[in-house]
Image: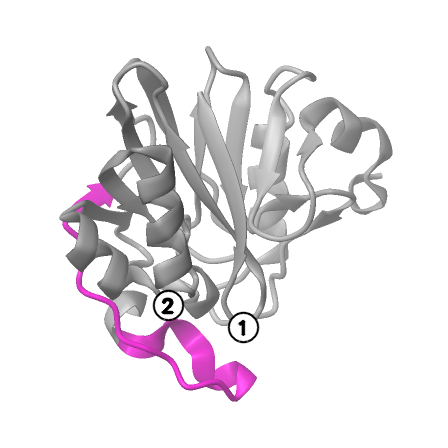
Amino acid sequence: MIVKMLHVGPLQTNCYIVGCEDTKEGAIIDPGGDAKRILAEVEQLGLKIKYVVNTHGHFDHTLANEEVVKATGASLAIHSADAPMLTKGGGAFFFGIMGQASPPADTILEEGQVLTLGEIELKVLHTPGHSPGSVCLYSEEEGVLFDGDVLFNMGMGRYDLPGGDYRVLMESIKKLLTLPDETTVYPGHGPATTIGRERRSNPFLS
């Protein structure tokens, strides 16, 4: 499995370019800015992008949607509960930042849905609390989880923005903690971690 992480946009969001090594079919997860740099990396990796996935609708995960979708012809995917954010700037005004409208979604994600990239399967887990439509993408075979702003390395996502809910977020995190300890977690901000490390040591979960 190909996994390339880039820090992009005004909040240095983790954008992930993932793909199948055999078929070169790929996806871009959370293109939060710097579209030209993302697209240059896609070209360097030789990937054909099938999906652009937003783990949620906040602006720092969606700012480059329009440019990367237009350049790749990929299907833009997001959960239905966050889909309305795409055309409303993703809450950028709360941070005093000029938002950029995204195209509407082509693919509406649901719990249990599977996105295929060649030989790779990414299962959609609905994990609200940071936002109503937050989702994670989990590959059991590869042992990886792309979890947006739900669970961080020794941290957790915010729940004080519109649509956030602490209780709901904690339930979503508990759902993630049922995954195998060795699962690598690729969060929306900060370094990667593992489910086991967060279960044992995350101070927000004690």
55 is higher (above) or lower (below) than 186: below
The one nearer the camera, 42 or 128, is: 42
Q: Is residue 106 magenta?
A: yes
Viewport quadrant of the N terminus: top left
Q: Amino acid at mark 2?
A: Leu
* First in residue order: circle 2 vs circle 1: 1
Q: Locate residue 49: give its quadrant.
A: top left
Residue that label 2 marks: 63
Badge 1 element: loop
Residue at x-position 46% and y-position 43%: 16
Viewport quadrant of the C terminus: top right
Q: How is the image coloured?
A: one colour
The one nearer the camera, 106 or 67, is: 67
- Is there a contact, CB below 8 Å, between mark 2 and mark 1? yes
Please rate how many residues cluster around mark 2, counting C-alpha atoms within 10 Å: few if below 14, some from 14 to 19, many from 20. many
Q: Locate residue 201: give its quadrant.
A: top right
Gap between marks 2 and 1 measured at Cα: 10 Å
- In the image, which residues are magenta? 88-108
Residue that label 1 marks: 10
Q: Amino acid at mark 1?
A: Pro
